[in-house]
Image: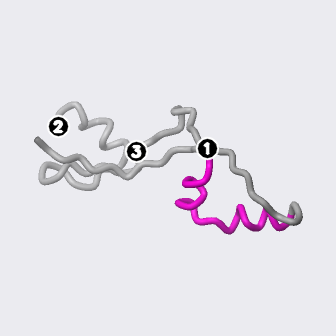
Amino acid sequence: MTIYRFDWKDIIYGRVEIEASSGQEAHDKLMGMRIKDLLHISQFNSDNNERSIRFADAGNQVENMDADEWNKLKMDL
């Protein structure tokens, strides 16, 4: 069994409620949150159409492939 490691990206969207005294304060709170904290308090989803692999590593067999190299070699590994 081989461990495959992926560096991926996806576009997600979410909904969060923020208590604030003004729209500007709410905006500032939202934009100042760490993504980890934002995801923790939000309802979120993805359309699953934007997920892509940036880099792949197949352990000792092949290392650090970009997305094009991975797409060519993934069936052979």
**For the N terminus, which image quadrant?**
top left
Scheme by which the image is coloured: one colour
What amino acid is found at the position of numbered circle 3 in the picture? Ile
Image location (x, y in percent) of residue 63: 22, 54
- Residue depicted at x 64% and y 65%: 33
Q: Position of residue 41 (x, y in %)?
A: 60, 54
Which residue appears at 48% of the width and 39% of the height? 51
70 inside magenta stretch: no
Quarter of the rendering containing residue 18: bottom right
Foreground: disc 1 or disc 3? 1
The residue nearer to you, when weighing 27 against 18, is 18
Judged from this view, the residue extending furthest toward the right is 22
User: Picture coordinates of residue 53 (x, y %)?
Assistant: 40, 44
Q: Nearer the viewer, mark 1 or mark 2?
A: 1
Q: Residue under circle 3?
A: 53
The residue to which callout 2 is attached is 77
Instruction: From the image, tell me which residue sits under label 1.
Output: 43
- Vertical side of 49 occupied by 67: above or below: below
Marks 3 and 2 close (CB-CB < 8 Å): no
What is the secondary structure assignment of the residue under circle 2? loop
In this rendering, is residue 30 above or below 11? Answer: below
